[in-house]
Image (tube, rainbow, N blue to C red):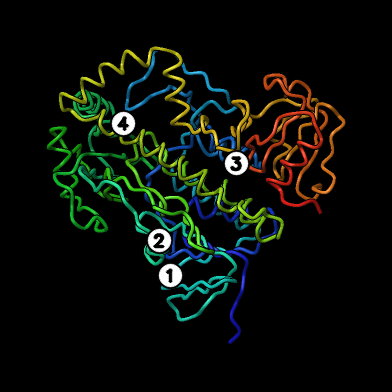
Amino acid sequence: MEQETVDVIIVGGGPTGTMLASELRLHDVSTVILERDAEPTPLIRSLGLHARSLEILDQRGLLDRFLAAGTSYPVTGSFAGLTPSRPVTLDSAHAYTLGLLQPVTDRLLAEHAVELGADLRRGTAVTGFEQDEDGVTVELADGSRLRSRWLVGCDGGRSFVRRTLGVGFPGEAATTEWLLGEVQVTAPADEIAAVSAEVRKTHRGFGIGPTDGGLFRAVVPAATVSEDRTTPPTLEDFTAQLRAYAGTDFGAHSPRSLSRFTDATRLAERYRVGRVFLAGDAAHIHPPLGGQGLNLGIQDAFDLGWKLAAAVAGWAPDDLLDTYATERRPAAEDVLTITRAQSELISPEPGPQAVRRLLTELVEFEDVARFLAEKVTGTGIRYDVGDGPDALGRRMPDVPLAHGRLYERTHEGRGLLLDGTDALSVQGWADRVDRITDVGAALEKYDAHALLLRPDGHIVWLGDAQADLGQHLERWFGAAG
């Protein structure tokens, strides 16, 4: 039997895997997604998307379908439940949070990947893989094999890919566990809201509120940290903890889902071993405070996708794939830091409560509130792409051009030269980079005559000299063709 061969195999069909597949398919990279579960999970772990993820969706022309399925909320600047009295201003055309249940996000991303030609195979478990200089051979549970040039593990916090690679996953073990349930209730909604508000005055880790289908979603601290967190709690476990914290179980019954999560915090020692990469929860886990996990995975995929496509196409500079780890691992470290901090701030212990009282005053300073909001939303990231002005390495927000707007020009996942001089050239790179001269006022805030954007929208050059531009084109887009 002839062995099937593709460019990239992605293990894991969650949001990180499907976002990565879409990025690869923009560049005609043959891509197979292997998802162990036969059906999409109904678990609602993420409740929405932050500003940077919304920018990414807009950059690829996907935002409208997500907006139609969700509800937009202003960015409040909330950090561990501490909210400034004034709205926070972000430098983004999408300075809002999109309330969207994770199963809907998962479905929309998977649909888009399939529309672009990704081969999503559900109910397909990976049992092993081996790599050599030319590629990776993957063994499946049914005994068949697949061959690819590259493999990416997007298979969650208990990643089979990471464990098979032998990559260390150091960090802190769980000290606190929460139970999460989607249940029907008999108590009136106004009574539930009143009880929840009262409990949360002293227990910020508790919460209950309505979700889709007439159900209520409740989070409550568990009695202990369980040894086997793969086994979901029982309804009896769940209602017992509701009564322990709220004095009532709200008549909870008929659960759609019951699960548990913890404050375990870990970061993979390496993001790449040869031809195998890690992304999303396979590379990092952390408490869910701030709702950053799914967003962080989408942003991992956005960084890796165009670089891996460049390697498949043959034009990637020698160290381009290495920049995935040097850019995204520090971004994950930053998220782990702020989720650890938020975990401490919701503790009822005197020390964390003293810090909480101090931070309550500090968030009233506009710069502090914006700094924390940029951390949570992902809009403050600055990659190390070399020395230069502060804008270098940052993502460029959507801006009006003389005709249309910037993000409308980024749907194909190519580089962009915004040329206010009307005298620069991308000759030799025109198959990878588009030149825009109708820049309007887009460059005014940058005090530059021209700038170069990578396919992910991060600025890697500002200037006006062709020779200098050529060096940076070669640095990020390979040798001229």
Residue 162: which numbered mark, if any? Answer: 2
State the residue position of label 4.
342
Whether residue 112 is visible: no
Residue 125: which numbered mark, if any? Answer: 1
Residue 373, image quadrant: top left
In whole angstroms, how far apart are the C-alphas of marks 3 and 2?
A: 33 Å
In whole angstroms, how far apart are the C-alphas of marks 4 and 1?
A: 36 Å
Residue 222, image quadrant: top left
**SS under mark 4:** helix
**SS under mark 2:** helix
Q: Amino acid at mark 1?
A: Ala
In whole angstroms, how far apart are the C-alphas of marks 4 and 3?
A: 32 Å
In whole angstroms, how far apart are the C-alphas of marks 4 and 2?
A: 27 Å
State the residue position of label 3.
65
Whether residue 245 is visible: yes
Classify 10 Å Cα crowding around label 1: few (below 14), some (14-19), many (20 and above).
some
The residue located at (76%, 26%) in the rendering is 401
Image position of 132 with respect to 104: above or below? below
Q: Amino acid at mark 4?
A: Gln
Classify 10 Å Cα crowding around label 2: few (below 14), some (14-19), many (20 and above).
many
Front tag of 1 and 3: 1
Q: Earlier in the sequence, mark 2 or mark 1?
A: 1
Q: Amino acid at mark 3?
A: Arg
Q: Earlier in the sequence, mark 3 or mark 2?
A: 3
Asked if labels 3 and 1 touch by Cβ distance under 8 angstroms, the answer is no
Q: Earlier in the sequence, mark 1 or mark 3?
A: 3
